[in-house]
Image (spheres, helix red, strand yellow):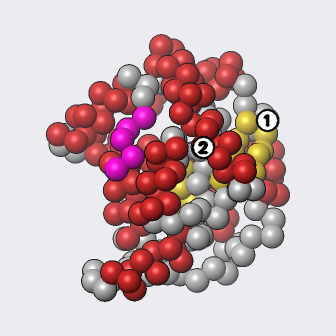
Amino acid sequence: HPPRIPPPPPCHRRRRRRRRRRRASHGRPRACRPGSGKGTQCALLSRHFGMTHLSAGDLLREEVASGSDTGQSIERIITAGKIVPSDVTVGLLQAAMAGAPGPFLIDGFPRSLSNLHAFDEAVGRCAFMLFLELGEAEMESRLIKRGATSGRSDDNAETIRKRFRTFNADSMPVIEELQKLDAVRFVSADGSVEEVFQRVLAAFAGEPLSVV
């Protein structure tokens, strides 16, 4: 089972950087299209392997709910279907990682090359990225259905389509860059939750993780 790594100490920059990169080596981001089921699969994975599941989207929405100036700015960006600035998202992830044990499963991140490079610089390179593949028509249908009960401002047809365009323009270059490093694993998200989960588990074969 991967070691449970404590938060870095508040001083000694050299020591902190070494520990921070060690912890990041256990991170497994998932930058999938909206509606592909990444949140559901991450929840299953975190229970199966005992990983700490961090959702970039949830962290951003929590900041919005706080009513802070930063939260209000984030809300405007999310409603427009755009990507929140990297320093904001990486800062929220760093704070969450400092207060939890690894290994980490980061949901919905990185969403742009800026996100990727900022995370690499501040935290370290991820172990690999898991990408769930699904057609846009099915993803839109899932998100519209979720919007009936989620209360999320971005779960409407207009914003969903903006998010798809943003993903294609900003997030696909991340996939292409990580593919060059052989750091992306593709899984079909078509089918039942359990069917997809079995494919996801197969993608984790050979990783230093133990079932809890």
**84 is within the stretch colored magenta:** yes
Amino acid type, mark 2: Val
**Can you see residue 148?**
no
| Rendered residue at 46%/57% (across/down) | 119
Over which residues does the magenta segment extend? Answer: 83-87
In the rendered view, would you say 207 is above or below 106? below
Please give the name of the residue rendered at 70% of the width and 73% of the height, measured from the top-left corner: 209
Residue visible at 61% across and 21% down? 140
Is residue 112 toward the left or the right of residue 176 in the image? Answer: left
Q: Residues within 10 Å of mark 2 (few under 14, many from 20)?
A: many
Name the one closer to the observer, 175 or 180: 180
Are discs 1 and 2 less than 8 Å apart at CB? no
Circle 1: element type: loop
Q: Give the vertical position of 55 relative to 171 (above or below).
A: below
In the image, which disc is placed on residue 48? none
Left or right: residue 65 compared with residue 172: left
Type of amino acid under label 1: Gly
The answer to whether residue 72 is above or below residue 115 is above
Mark 1 crowdedness (10 Å alpha carbons): few <14, some 14-19, many ≥20: few
Name the residue tied to disc 1: 191
Question: Is residue 168 in view from this perspective?
Answer: yes
Residue 135: give x, y in percent of width and height. Answer: 72, 25
Dominant secondary structure, magenta = loop
Q: Which residue is mark 2?
A: 174
Question: Number of numbered discs present?
Answer: 2
Residue 144 vs residue 17, the one in the foreground: 17
